[in-house]
Amino acid sequence: MNRFKLGYGAAVVLLATLAAAAVTALVLKAIGASPVATYVTIFTGPLKDVFGLTEILVRAVPLILVALGISIAFRSGIINIGAEGQMLMGILAATGTALALPAWPRGALGGGLWAAIAGTLKARLGVNEILSTVMLNYIAAQFYTFFLRGPMIDPGELETGSGTPQSMRLPEAALLSRLIPGTRLHTGLLLALVLCVAVYCFLWRTTWGFRLRAAGAEAKAARYAGISVEGSLVAAMVLSGAFAGLAGAVEVSGVHHRAIENISSGYGFAGIVVALFGALHPAGIVPAAVFFGLLLVGADMTQRSAGVPANMILVLQGVLILTIVSAKMYLNNAYAQERAARWFARLRPRPAPAEAKPGGQP
Amino acid sequence: MSHSMVYNILSLGVPFSVALLLASLGEMFNQRAGVFNLGCEGIMCMGAFLGFLPPYFFKTGALAPYATLVGFAVAMAAGILLGLLFALVTVTFRAEQGIAGIGLQMFGWGVAGTLFRHFIGGVTGVPGVAAWAIPGLSRIPFLGGILFNHNPVVYLAFLLVPASWYVLFKTPWGLKVRAAGTEPRAADSMGINVNRVRYQALMVGGALAGLGGAYLSLCQAKMFADDLVAGRGFIAVALVYFGRWSPLGILGGALLFSLAQSLQLAIQVAGIKFPYEFAVMLPYVLVILVLSLARKARMRGPTHLGIPYNREMRY
């Protein structure tokens, strides 16, 4: 990729982000908050001390894991909106089951099996996976509250009579150790980074990964080449769900140490934005996850300091999805690029880098 | 089951179906024109919230009697605007519709939630719309109370079923909509502006989804809460598949869901032991079942559903 292409891509993404920020600013204006002050708090507040910095990474860990899973699914041509539910099922499997396995694989198994429902329905019966995963989110949320209020509730809660719906504390052996004492940053971060490399290797350096991507890029051609498109849809969905379930298991064993209500706190949906923002590539997902970790921590801070509801982050995420998918038309469009290059060349007397250096890396 | 229980289930189920029916009819126009609008949920959230505002703010005063009417109008206007936004993203920018829909859902939900927390914050009721028994018809024993003793929006929604059938199948605009979703290239070569038709369909769909949302807050719940819509927008999208893209089928689907809901309420009222969470789960499970069984129906759907139209490309 030559320099012009890179700069062009960056400019389009930047414009999309600015457009999203502008729309969100309108909403902030409507509730009487100062958009500039709010954005300043969001972007600088968490950077002021070590705790804020580590909190960003604490949020980035589940975001990375969820986004990795989502990018596997998207690249394989199946859209997974169900990460939220898969995370909850992963948490249930990690805290509630007595399988002779550590918490991580149990969580991955839980999320993967939950996602397998949507994957199989898509492959066998052609059920729209977006609708089915959204529905499975609602169902998983109800399952989760049912288990937390009933079978899995901490017996201590029943004895004292407070009845807070939460599970028993996980055994000490199941907890992830803290990387920096006094903060919530845990070893799950290392796991997430290792898995980034693993996903890259899987998708771009193995035959299986190639099959998945081929089925996603052009199902007809893949089928002619003898790839089972249906099989790869299910496989991609299960893998995707496993990552979300893993995110849940890591979150519960690294941060909260027990299953509580509202534990997923929208990571499943934020993960979609992170995956899109990171161009569905592990190398993009890590910085995108850190960026959104910053946004989430910052939004909490503005809620506490300026009384701006943290829901506004949902607004920003929603608009970001809309602007990024809109910008895609310009990102992978040779005509639009050429037009921009010509326009760029007219601005500067020197020939644009795109024309100066033909035949760069394909 | 006693006679009065059946009566209660049926007479509750009919008004419950209205929000689904309105949103689903709107979504039918979207999908017939070839646009898969998952943002329906977000539009309903915005409609529910904005429709709730006028009666909330004008409880007394000269405007009070018209506040609910203004609420419906505001909700529809917001729906049209959000429909336009979705059209801009998916028709003009040709974005992937499924993901864009989730973006619109998050946007609508987030804006409604943020504004709600700032301006209102807690549970507050609105007067709602009084039932208007149709003279004569409502006196029919049994059926009269079930069908003809509701608020006017219920009748409007049911009248929209034949009306939208007429618009879709008997008017030139309906033909354009169906052409845009089935064979956009042919439509284009006949001089139909495919993108304009899709814009129009999305505006109609947005208005109906906004109205459906406002029905939830103004007539059904008579209050607003963050999770008031609770996936009904997504269910409405699924109902379009279930109803095979026809108004009558959609009506059947909406009634099926609303009767399931009122049956579940009746079970709870009757004190039958059943975990509450599983009762809430029921409609969502039903959606997945319905979609799994609607396999053959999909073959009759608009062939260009979900595919952006690009007149510069061959495909």
Image: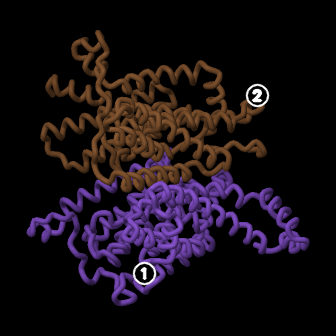
Chain colours: A purple, B brown
Both labels 2 and 1 in a single chain: no
Q: Is residue B96 left or right of residue A262?
A: right
The answer to whether residue B206 shows anywhere in this view is yes
Q: Secondary structure at mark 1?
A: helix
Q: Label 2, secondary structure: give it.
A: loop
In the rendered image, the quadrant that contains the N terminus of chain A is bottom right
Front residue of A132/A315: it is A315
Residue at x-position 43% and y-position 57%? A116
Q: Which mark is residue B281?
A: none
The kind of residue on which mark 1 rests is Gly
Residue position marked by numbered label 1 in the rendering: A52
Q: Identify the residue at the far bottom of this view.
A: A181
Residue annotated with mark 2: B190
**In the picture, which quadrant includes the C terminus of chain A?**
bottom right
Q: From what the image shows, is residue A58 above or below residue B23?
A: below
Residue located at (25% from left, 11% from top): B140
Q: Looking at the image, is B275 positioned above or below residue A33?
A: above
Please rate how many residues cluster around mark 2, counting C-alpha atoms within 10 Å: few if below 14, some from 14 to 19, many from 20.
few
Q: Chain of mark 1?
A: A
How many discs mark residues in the rendered view?
A: 2
Q: Looking at the picture, how far across and down is residue A236, in whole percent?
A: 51, 61
Of all chains, the one bearing label 2 is B
Q: Which quadrant of the view contains residue B142? A: top left
Q: Position of residue A278 (x, y in %)?
A: 58, 68
As measured in the structure, the alpha-carbon distance from the residue carrying label 2 to the one carrying label 1 is: 61 Å
* Res A125 visible: no
Q: Is residue A193 above or below residue A180?
A: above
Locate residue A302: give its quadrant. Answer: bottom left
- The front one of A63 and A86 is A63
Residue located at (53% from left, 67% from top) = A36
Residue B136, horizontal then vertical, whole percent? 29, 9
For disc 1, the neighbor class at 10 Å (few under 14, some 14 to 19, many from 20) is some
